[in-house]
Amino acid sequence: MFPLPLLRVLALAAALQQSTPSATSPIAPPRDSGAAIRSITIDERLAAAAGLSVGDRVLLAPAAGAVGDSVVIAAITRRGADPSEVARSEYRVRLHLDHLETLTRSGDRVGRFAVQSREEADPSAVSAAINEAAFGFRAYPAAEVAVETSATFRVVNRFHRAIGVITIVASAIFLLCITLLKVDERRRDVGALRLIGMSRSSVVRAVVLEASLVSLIGSIMGAGLGWFASWVVNWYYQGVYATPLRFAIVTPSIVVFAVTLSLGLGVIAGLLAAQRLVRRAPLELIGR
């Protein structure tokens, strides 16, 4: 089987209709009704949009209204998780190479193709050898193609990273302010404890422990909220674009990073708030 990029709907307006057309159908009958019926595969988006299933007969033509061939749908393929193809509203049809050449009347011509090398071969050396063999084409390693096609996504990734850094800094400042306010509200209690003999280090440990516990609980709740939000995002956009690509993920490394960062910020905020509290005299804390 061979992919048919030329017969994508936006590129060539391929005419795919059920093979039981009415008398007014613009699609002409097959060129050779006595020949063996060829098989094709279509992607799941086309199958869902046209209401097609495995075993259906359709007319395949290079253009709408042109003479076509009667073919049988042998399989329905699922789209791969390729970010570069998510926004493309294209339908894909795969057919045998000789069938493609006959249908498009472009024998011995191809727009692009892929060559798989052995595992021990160097892709850069293979592409260089191919480019030196003749003129008229250009070979690229798959890694370079992936880099070029993912340039937009790298920009989006850097943009999201910048947003994340700004959010973390703002959250840290907000957490410090809230901790300072909460600790300051309890200055009378701390002053009374200091008067009955509680040491400064005990006050610091108690405040830091409480801030760490609050940070841990908040990070766990945030991880759960993030997992639920990612599930909703994936459920919606995978249905819209008919792709298995996951648009949002919550990995264990992300959870570990979030919990560690939250605990670190909680400890720092609690330590700063406690130091500000224990530096004041006990009588000053209780308002005397």
Image (spheres, rainbow, N blue to C red):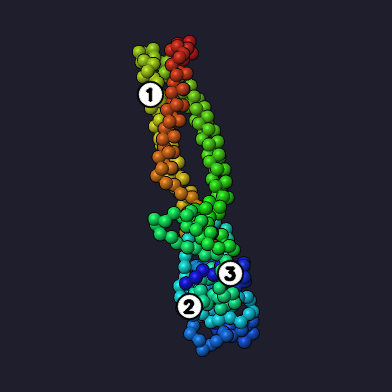
Q: CA distance from mark 1 to mark 3?
A: 70 Å
In the picture as drawn, the residue positioned furthest to the bottom comes out as 34
Which residue is painted at 39% across and 44% down in the image? 252
Question: Of the residues tagged 2 and 3, which is closer to the observer?
Answer: 3
| Earlier-in-chain disc, 2 versus 1 | 2
In the rendering, which numbered label is found on residue 6? 3
Choose top left, top right, bottom left or bottom right for residue 271: top left
Q: Is residue 280 left or right of 62 when viewed as pictured? A: left
Which amino acid type corresponds to the residue marked 3 in the rendered image?
Answer: Leu
Q: Position of residue 274 (x, y in %)?
A: 44, 21
| Earlier-in-chain disc, 1 versus 3 | 3
Report the residue marked by disc 2: 39
Which residue is painted at 42% across and 32% down in the image? 263
Q: Is residue 30 left or right of 195 when viewed as pictured? A: right
Q: CA distance from mark 2 to mark 1?
A: 74 Å
Q: Position of residue 7 (x, y in %)?
A: 58, 71
Q: Specify few, some or many for label 1: CA neighbours under 10 Å numbering under 14, 14-19, or 20 or more.
A: some
In the rendering, which numbered label is found on residue 18? none
